[in-house]
Amino acid sequence: SQELEQSPQSLIVQEGKNLTINCTSSKTLYGLYWYKQKYGEGLIFLMMLQKGGEEKSHEKITAKLDEKKQQSSLHITASQPSHAGIYLCGAFGGSNYKLTFGKGTLLTVNP
Amino acid sequence: NAGVTQTPKFQVLKTGQSMTLQCAQDMNHEYMSWYRQDPGMGLRLIHYSVGAGITDQGEVPNGYNVSRSTTEDFPLRLLSAAPSQTSVYFCASSYFEDRGQEGYTFGSGTRLTVV
């Protein structure tokens, strides 16, 4: 079965700093999703990457997919307290409907 | 509002009690699933359904039952609650063939404590 490893597990940054979260798959990626979760809430969709080399941006968050490395990275520029939360990557792997998730990266942004 | 609705938001059960976590979606999604989220374990799939009348086990199905009598509803039943089932439970849904750009739509979760 596919496994997704996220790094780092947790991250504390000062407001205004840039940061990167990585998601590495044990198998070929057939689409990679990034979600954000605030404490006590559900998962909110951020973006989906489907093709190798694809890069998408939403406000100050950019995600890239490196198909050869079976890896995706999520980069936040000039972090703000509103970026704090748990970031999770998810992928379908060999199944076309069962989404497997990484364990998440807990991001804290200090004002 | 369109989306996935989970009830209740919070629940405390005594060991051995039974209860049903409700999940309803109004997007006509064929696929529905239940996950549990535990610290350090991430999201783990409990059960899923690809359409009314069809259910299957996920990664951690023991202690849970599901049924799918309608497209809209996918309840999760705990027959005899155990402290190990203390967790946050999420219901998610999507189209089966064409997931579009958003993958799953998630409910806001049910925080369950078994004492």
Image: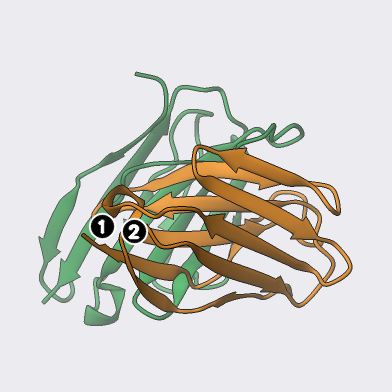
Chain colours: A orange, B green
Percent position of residue A27, x then y? 81, 73
Percent position of residue B67, x then y? 48, 46
- As shown in the figure, which amino acid type bears the numbered disc 1? Tyr
Which quadrant does the N terminus of chain A fall into? Answer: bottom right
Quick one: which residue is furthest to the top in this view? B1
Q: Look at discs 1 and 2 and give the one toward the viewer.
A: 2
- Chain where mark 2 sits: A
**Dot 2 alpha-carbon crowd within 10 angstroms: few under 14, some 14 to 19, many 20 or more:** some
Which quadrant does the C terminus of chain A fall into? Answer: bottom left
For the residues bearing labels 1 and 2, Cβ distance under 8 angstroms: yes
**Dot 1 alpha-carbon crowd within 10 angstroms: few under 14, some 14 to 19, many 20 or more:** few
Q: Which mark is residue A85?
A: 2
Percent position of residue A6, x then y? 57, 74
- Taking the spot 36% from the left edge, 57% from the top edge, the residue there is A16
From the viewer's perspective, tell me whether residue A13 is left or right of residue B42. Answer: left
Q: Is residue A20 above or below residue B28?
A: below
Q: Is residue B78 visible?
A: no
From the viewer's perspective, tell me whether residue B65 is left or right of residue B39. Answer: right
Secondary structure at badge 2 equals strand
**Tag 2 or tag 1, which sits nearer the N-term?**
1
- As shown in the figure, which amino acid type bears the numbered disc 2? Gly
- Chain where mark 1 sits: A
Secondary structure at badge 1 equals loop
User: Distance of mark 1 from mark 2, alpha carbons?
Assistant: 7 Å
Q: Is residue B94 visible?
A: yes
From the viewer's perspective, tell me whether residue B52 is left or right of residue B108. Answer: right
- Taking the spot 11% from the left edge, 77% from the top edge, the residue there is B115
Q: Quadrant of residue B12?
A: bottom left
Q: What residue is disc 1 on? A: A39
- Taking the spot 52% from the left edge, 22% from the top edge, the residue there is B27
Percent position of residue B34, x then y? 46, 54
